[in-house]
Image (spheres, grey):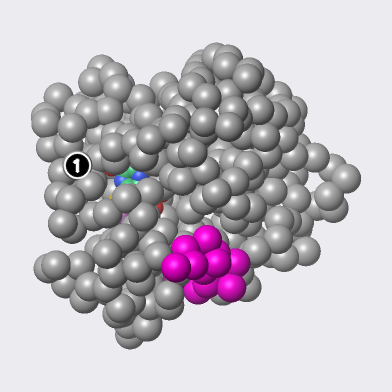
Amino acid sequence: MARDEITPPQLYLHRREFLALGAGSLASATAVLATARACAAPPPPAQKLSIAVRGKFTTEEKPTSFEDLTHYNNFYEFGTDKVDPAQNAGSLRPHPWQISLEGEIKKPQIIDIDQLTKQFPLEERVYRMRCVEAWSMVIPWVGFSLGNLLRRLEPTSRAKYVAFTSLHDPTQMPGQKRSVLDWPYVEGLRIDEAMHPLTLLAVGLYGQVLPHQNGAPLRLVVPWKYGFKGIKSIVKIRLVAEQPPTTWSRMAPREYGFYANVNPQVDHPRWSQAKERRIGELTKRKTLPFNGYATEVAQLYAGMDLAHNY
Ligand SMILES: Nc1nc2c(c(=O)[nH]1)N[C@H]1C(S)=C(S)[C@@H](COP(=O)(O)O)O[C@H]1N2
Ligand SMILES: [Mo]
């Protein structure tokens, strides 16, 4: 997307409006079909998010191609190969979609994704993303700050962590018929990490509604952490007093910690984290502490031993 296509901040996009704008749009359907591969259950054509504010913290690095970031995915609910989600995620039904906001907050509620999205101006934020498997991408997300949502819910003084849960429905997510992971997928953040302005709830990428394989209709984006923290297809956000369990640290606690901050100095037990392969490039890059966001987030971990709290 060209930089000058970004619309000025006064034009906020509300979900109902973009649905009206984009539904059945020939232009967006063509764009998606041009990049789609033959699929067993192809996802429907995407609705365009034609208006988005360019948010702060955006990197000037070149975004990974739409093709790559929608055909090289980890989303085990749709299979364990990188190409599986693009082929199998057509069975996900991201509308209508309810999200339960609950726990240590003064305003618990169950809210529809359209109602939720309408409440926040959508920003475009181009973030570096780094998977624990030592590949990386640059993704132009569209979303809003998780902190903006949490503040509206009025957390109580007991709220110390935020626990997220993905959809659990094997009829929509065929990978859940096998117990490769302990379903549903769950993740968590400390409250200060969740409130940090870099932390995003994404509803789109490349100016259009999130493709199913990238976690439609709502997923977490925490760019200084390994990709597995970025839980997809969220149905529940619960504020809690104790550190919540997380899927990958439950599976293999020695390999995947709760914090999962990108750290080139702390190797995974089975491979180095010093370098990464940027999808679409041939030579490896050096991995940066906190994935290059140290200036913004390092102070959150002042005094913590990050080799112990990996
Ligand atoms: N529900 C759920 N969320 C998930 C995963 C998953 O398997 N299930 N995989 C995680 C991992 S390991 C990564 S790297 C990112 C990948 O996001 P992307 O496919 O949009 O790049 O999603 C994360 N969120
Ligand atoms: Mo990952």
Residue type at mark 1?
Arg
Residue 44 among those drawn in magenta: no
Q: Is residue 68 left or right of residue 141?
A: left
Q: Which residue is mark 1?
A: 250
Which region of the structure is painted magenta? 291-303
Pinpoint residue 40: horizontal percent, then vertical percent.
Answer: 25, 34
Pinpoint residue 129: horizontal percent, then vertical percent.
Answer: 44, 62
* Quarter the N terminus occupies: bottom right
Most extreme residue toward the right is 10
Q: Residue at x 63, y 18 (%)?
A: 107
Residue 140 seen? yes
Density class for disc 1 (Cα within 10 Å; few <14, some 14-19, many ≥20) is: some
For residue 74, above or below residue 183: below
Q: Is residue 231 left or right of residue 122?
A: left
For residue 223, above or below residue 115: below
Q: Is residue 283 left or right of residue 28?
A: left
Residue toward you, 51 or 44: 51
Residue toward you, 4 or 111: 111
For residue 84, above or below residue 137: above
Q: Residue at x 63, y 42 (%)?
A: 147
Residue toward you, 232 or 155: 155
Pinpoint residue 217: horizontal percent, then vertical percent.
Answer: 50, 31
Q: Is residue 254 left or right of residue 192?
A: left
For residue 234, above or below residue 263: above
Q: Quadrant of residue 122?
A: top right
Residue 237 seen? no
